Image (spheres, helix red, strand yellow):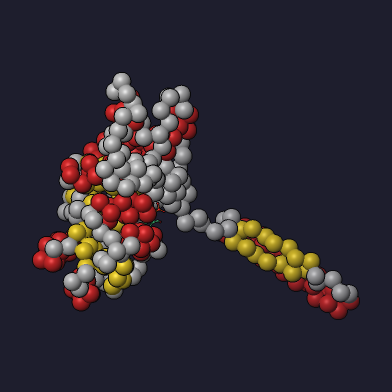
Amino acid sequence: MVRVAILVPNPPVVITAVFTFLIYISCINLYFEKHSTLIIHVEIISMRVPLSEPWISKQDKLMMMRCLNNPQLTDGPILRQFESKFSKVTKSKFAIGVSNGTQALQLSLISLGIGKGDEVIIPDLTFVATANAVIATGAKPVPVDIIPSLNISIDSIKEKISNKTKAVIPVHFAGLACNMNKLSKIAKKHNLFIVEDCAHAFGTYLDKKHVGTFGDMGCFSFYPTKNITTVEGGMIITNSKKLSKKLYSLRNHGLTKNLIQRDKNTKPWNYDIKDPGHNFRLDEIRSSLGLSQLKRQKIKKYSWN
Ligand SMILES: Cc1ncc(COP(=O)(O)O)c(C=O)c1O
């Protein structure tokens, strides 16, 4: 049997030609089935529309190349610019760049003191990273139902709150904002933190406020399928100075000073370590890609609800 695969990029344009070809092949097959052992098998494989395709412009590439001329290749001035622009766009007081969205969630929970013995409520419809980030802290993810709009069910949250529950992670799934007003009331009543999973939701507004600014923290992903990309990367936003200080330190091994602060000192090796931290830093190449992408975003503010 001979297999012939036909890729169809634009069905309406090629459909007539393909049908003619099929009829032609069928006739040949009929002939060979009777007279020989040669059978031609035709498969039409339609070219799929990709789930997403990153848009990397010439300017993006230029920015990435340029940053390689700077001596500081990570945790440097371009990351600071990216963070500052991100907090401006989302109207949050602080933005903390990290290596990916999962670490953004994990670090947020750690900075809130969440760990072993605690429970964190998450929706049962999300990417596994939401649950993995909770597990990485030592806490237990407690999945609850969603409502038809694909967002976490407030009623289901109420049912699952226990004396171990410390936080809720609402996921603004596929850019659909959760009901943050109702959720904030419940969180306040039960003394729960809210860490918003905004991995799908850069550019999503609710009541003219960017998502991620309703809870204690908002976590974004810049994975290549997301609205803007740094290849791998993430960002945490918060309005709390205290939490931001903790997050800046925890992403950098728990050091009290970053490289820029240390370089200003005559003794750059002089720093303290207050808490056990992580290396969740965002390097300058990825930051320059993120900054360049952010600069050409034209966000139209409209609320879903
Ligand atoms: C809902 C959700 N949360 C978190 C993440 C984790 O982001 P990252 O892949 O940047 O770690 C993703 C990634 O796709 C996601 O879809």
Please tell me which residue is depicted at 21% across the width and 58% down the height of the picture.
Answer: 194
Question: In x, y percent, where is residue 6?
Answer: 67, 60
Residue 151's x, y, as percent? 28, 66
Q: Nearer the viewer, residue 97 or 294?
A: 97
68 w.r.t. 188: above or below = above
Q: Residue at 32% x, 54% y: name it.
A: 105
| Residue 271, above or below 163 | above
Give left or right: position of 71 versus 87: right
Along the line of sight, the residue nearer the viewer: 256 or 270 = 270
Query: In the picture, residue 18 is in which quadrant?
Result: bottom right
Total label count? Answer: 0
Q: Quadrant of the rendered structure where residue 124 is?
A: bottom left
Where on the image, by quarter, is ligand 1?
A: bottom left
Give residue 98's position: percent from left, percent from top. 35, 44
Is residue 130 in view from this perspective?
Answer: no
Quarter occupied by the N terminus: bottom right
**In terms of image quadrants, where is residue 181?**
bottom left
Horizontal side of 222 relative to 247 (left or right) equals right
Q: Residue furthest bottom?
A: 34
Residue 125 in view here: yes
From the top left corner, tell me how far across and down residue 66 is, in percent: 45, 26
